[in-house]
Amino acid sequence: MNNTYKKTIENAYNITKPLKDQGELATYIPELANINPSKFGVHMTKIDGTNFGFGDHLEKFSIQSIAKVLSLALAVKFLGERIWTRIDVEPSGTKFDSLLLLETYKGIPRNPFVNSGAIVICDILMSHLEDARKEFLEFVRELSDIPDLQYSDKIADSEKATGYRNVALCNFIKSFGNIKNEPADVLDFYFDMCSLEMNCQQLAHTFSFLANGGRKFDGTKIISSSQSKRINALMLTCGFYDESGEFAFKVGLPGKSGVGGGIVALYPNNYTIAVWSPKLNKNGNSFKGMKLLEDVTTHSEMSIF
Ligand code: DON
């Protein structure tokens, strides 16, 4: 089976690599505009721990919104179901940084993966943890088995200097009473969270607990299997913003994208896969990443459906 997957992924990589990207780098975060747009890598980690990759799979990139899944996992671990009074679990049908539905739903974000929802999760973590910034980093260090993982000040500072929409989102939510801490502090934590850097191998490893009923490969329990199922359900329905339906339609796996060009997807009880190609389509998702994953599930004929 491993060899079959390896061949399928190698083929998908070779077919996707020469495609001309119909997309652009995320230039609204100046630091992300400096990335070589031709980078392309993929890595798969099977539930038995075997793993393999192709292309630039060992080169680090900014994971951006992919980190929102990890902050959600930490919030769920500590607070359980209580968080769902502050954030909904519905697809938004809007761009990741949209303000539109916050007015309609009185400051309750549609889900934890749009920026507004992830900002509320940051606020919740800050209210309930002594030092959310530190404890979140320790949590990701444990998941990733990268003991010296650090926030990237360069990327966080670059986003802090230009993140006007996120400032607007946070203040707007605060006006409805759904942000409890100081908006500037919540945003600092949010930008730091998005600044984490990993390569495809590390990302696939980090997410393996969600393919394994909430447990790391070594058996360490991170969250319950029911909580893991729910996070996967949210990745399927909301992981790609206004393109979540299309991702379910064409790929058929829970997944999450980031504007650094990364995507992580997983097949429960089977594998996690991380892909990186920096040019984004109009919905803010990696153009080649989406194409590669579509090819993988089409040719392996394995999706959760
Ligand atoms: O808040 C932002 O705009 C970024 N830090 C994260 C956005 C993102 O990755 C959206 N994903 N496709």
Image (tube, helix red, strand yellow):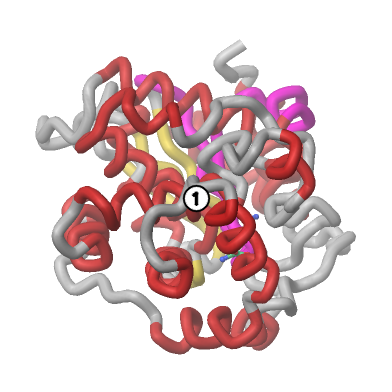
Q: Is residue 234 visible?
A: yes
Q: Is mark 1 within 8 Å of ligand 1?
A: yes
Residue 242 percent across, percent down from the top left:
77, 39
Q: Does the stretch in magenta take in 174?
A: no
Quadrant of ligand 1: it is bottom right
Residue 251: which quarter of the image?
A: top right
Relative to residue 182, is residue 7 depicted above or below?
above
Residue 179 percent across, percent down from the top left:
45, 53
The residue carrying mark 1 is 118
Q: Secondary structure at mark 1?
A: helix
Residue in the picture at 55% in, 64% down: 55
Q: Is residue 26 left or right of residue 39?
A: right
Q: Is residue 158 left or right of residue 19?
A: left
Q: Which residues are magenta?
A: 245-269
Residue in the picture at 28% in, 43% down: 74
The front one of 258 and 191 is: 191
Residue 130: which quarter of the image?
A: bottom left
Residue in the picture at 64% in, 72% down: 39
Q: Is residue 197 visible?
A: no
